[in-house]
Amino acid sequence: MRRRDVLAGAGSLATGAALTFPAPAFAQGLRQLKMVTAWPAGSPGLQSSADRLAQRISTASDGRINIQVFPAGAFVGAFEIFDAVRTGLADMTDYYWEKKSAAFSFFAAVPFGFTANELFAWVQYGGGQELWDALSGQFNIKPLLCLNTGTQMGGWCTREVPSPEAFRGLRYRMPGLGGDVLRRIGATVVNVPGGEIVNTFKSGAIEGSEWVGPWLDMDLGLHKVAGYYYYPGFHEPGTGSTLGINKRLWESFDASERRLIEDAAAAEYARSLAEFNFNNALWLRKLRDEGTVKILKFDDSVLKELYRISKDVVAEAGSGDDLSKKIYASYQQSFPLIIDWSDIAEGAVLNSRRLA
């Protein structure tokens, strides 16, 4: 779900929500705002999350802040939301910001990086938010985490990929840093909009593709065009999406309004993660019950090679300007700390379940 298109010409899998606040909308203490997203209307888990966030802010503010949500294409195109928010025309999502700076990837997903809870911990308490504010501020945007899909799947294939060598020449759809990793392992990386994945499979133009997880993958129909479903999603271990707010608008809010929006975004981050986790569990069960798809773990030899390559790819993403280097340094400092705790806390509990 990271750096990916939801439909042809639509948004990526990290929730893209953008708020726009035109000057005429300020009247009698009320704010009428526009939120533009990268998701098509009716997208489960994505557009529905944006709608829920807007409603939460309106309700919590007693109607003082009202937000009209526009799905992809209804106000601006999915690929236009960043500039729409930057210029004050609207507000938006973070998933496509990596083209503005590769360092934005650290606040969404990097291969073998933070899980959803770990990402939120770093952003909230490890200095990530301050660095993110500085990075986004260069583009006149205030960023807040507002959605997470949780750990994603590695993707669908029409044939087995039992070894690193099996990736050579494999035509695989995977955008972003994950795509860079696959390219270096020998795959032929193909990028097509999410809405075109199924037909691209049918045409034979691709032999593999990632999307999100069982819930949205089956909603898209990927289980009907590919017989092998791999995990884990090394490329997106916890994909965060951003509520980007025009900086001038953000600075016009008083302290209580800012806190309200921050708390609403944090609440939606937790709620969306819960929604994805439960629905992925339900749809995984449905997929198993159907029995037509082989659900396979990437071989350890594959994961070790992907991890080795990922270290270089991630380091390059943090090797840009001085601010990018600071972000990468913070990530590198926090990552082993969080891994240590995760391994002896949640990781140990998860491993102990296998003993029963």
Image (spheres, rainbow, N blue to C red):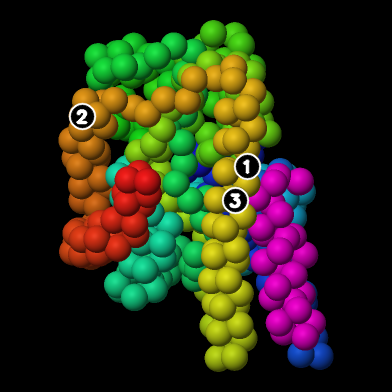
Pointers 2 and 1 in contact (CB under 8 A)?
A: no
**At x 61% / y 11%, what residue is drawn?**
202
Say what amino acid the circle numbered 3 marks: Phe
Disc sitting over residue 305 in the figure: 2
Which of 110 and 216 lies nearest the eye of the viewer?
Answer: 216
- In the image, residue 119 sits, relative to residue 299, either above or below, namely below
Which of 187 and 345 lies nearest the eye of the viewer?
Answer: 345
**At x 25% / y 64%, what residue is drawn?**
341
**At x 53% / y 39%, what residue is drawn?**
212
Q: Judge whether residue 208 can be spotted in this image.
A: yes
Mark 2 and mark 1: Cα distance apart in space? 31 Å
Task: Report crowding for label 2: few under 14, some 14 to 19, many 20 or more residues within 10 A (C-alpha).
Answer: some
Q: Secondary structure at mark 1?
A: helix
Q: Secondary structure at mark 2?
A: helix
Q: What x and y, as percent, mark residue 246? A: 57, 69
Q: What x and y, as percent, mark residue 165? A: 25, 14
Task: Report crowding for label 1: few under 14, some 14 to 19, many 20 or more residues within 10 A (C-alpha).
Answer: few
Pointers 1 and 3 in contact (CB under 8 A)?
A: yes
Q: Is residue 40 left or right of residue 78?
A: right
| Magenta extent | 41-69
For disc 3, the marked residue is: 278
Mark 1 and mark 3: Cα distance apart in space? 6 Å
Mark 3 and mark 2: Cα distance apart in space? 31 Å
Task: Report crowding for label 3: few under 14, some 14 to 19, many 20 or more residues within 10 A (C-alpha).
Answer: few
Please give the count of numbered marks on the rendered protein.
3
